[in-house]
Image (tube, rainbow, N blue to C red):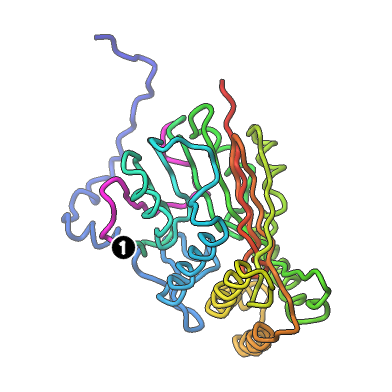
Amino acid sequence: MSRDTDLDVVEVDTDAESGYGESAQSEWTSLRSSIMNYHYENGRRYHAYHAGSYWGPNDEKAMEQLDIGHHVFNLLLDGKLYLAPIPEDVEQVLDIGTGTGIWAIDFADTHPSARVIGTDLSPIQPTWIPPNLHFEVDDCCDDWVYGKDSFDFIHVRGLYGCVADWDKFYKEALDHLKPNSYLEQVEVSVVPKSDDGSTNNTVFEEWGRVSLQAGDAFGKTLRIVDEAKEKMIKAGFVDVQEHRFKCPVGPWAKDPRLKVLGKYNRLQWEMGIEGWSMMLLTRFLNWTRQEVEVYLARMRQALRDPSIHAYQEKYSYPPLPLLFLLPFPWDLPYPTTALITKPMT
């Protein structure tokens, strides 16, 4: 058997004895605390791993809102979990920013032959899960730890405001996809719109402006819904397709399907607006908690105003590579999806 003689020698840390003196229990306690010692601020709970790198809380209220959001996406896509033309017997799947893990669980249940990995900064996923699924605490902004050409399908949903360097992110995704495989990203716009101008000069218009400003101050754009397609193509993805959808905020639409969508989307907004805004506005725009609460009270009142016909845009980028871009609860009509394919090499 031949030996590779080009490998670098691993240097020994002469001070490493301290790490060996720890008991297994104390080491486990230390490592666990780095991901489980949650941070509390303005009445909400936030992730401990890479604390401060994500704006959203991870408490029970946030988890319930995320699950309602999953239902909104399901309604939007007529029960489909994805648009990419992947085979039913797809093998290796990565769900980035898995949140409560609800998408990954549903996917693993319906694709029992697949090996599914869900990653997130917060270990808030359930333990009772399909045997072909496991969750990992990980930051997608770090260098990826998987082997090159590892995945047949990478799913991304709701990473707006999570990534500082999207060019690097898409390069990592491309490098870790097998040839002729798919990336699907679903994002939402944080800028609510209306076809009849009813959002003009309202708190909805203010919400869009303030949200974009907060994301810019945070250093992680909330504009990725409009920038993803160009960045994917720049990274080397091919056949990038964009699909845009409108998702009403409230039951004002005449169409029965959109009316139901609007009801659930408004519920998501009502549960989510505090978590979407509190950390960003107090830390990065220097608002007080009281100022944020007044702002949110105005938004809750507007959400129940039948004269305001707001919707969110959702974007989708499919065929070979797939990407979904949806407008966020701030502009959530339909989920946005983008399908992107990695070219054959």
Position of 279 with respect to 26 (left or right) is right
- Magenta: main secondary structure equals loop
Q: Is residue 273 above or below residue 150?
A: below
Q: Is residue 149 above or below residue 72?
A: above
**Amino acid at dot 1:** Pro
Q: Is residue 289 magenta?
A: no
Instruction: Looking at the picture, tell me which residue is in the foreground, 321 or 35.
Output: 321
Quadrant where the image shows the N terminus: top left
Q: Secondary structure at mark 1?
A: loop
Instruction: Looking at the picture, tell me which residue is in the foreground, 46 or 108.
Output: 108
Q: Is residue 133 magenta?
A: yes
Measured as percent of width and height from the top left, residue 50 is found at 46, 60
User: Which portion, as a residue range, is magenta?
Assistant: 126-148
- Write down the quadrant of residue 67 in the picture: bottom left
Measured as percent of width and height from the top left, residue 325 is found at 63, 53
Q: How many marks?
A: 1
Q: Which residue is mark 1?
A: 126
Q: Residues within 10 Å of mark 1 (few under 14, many from 20)?
A: few
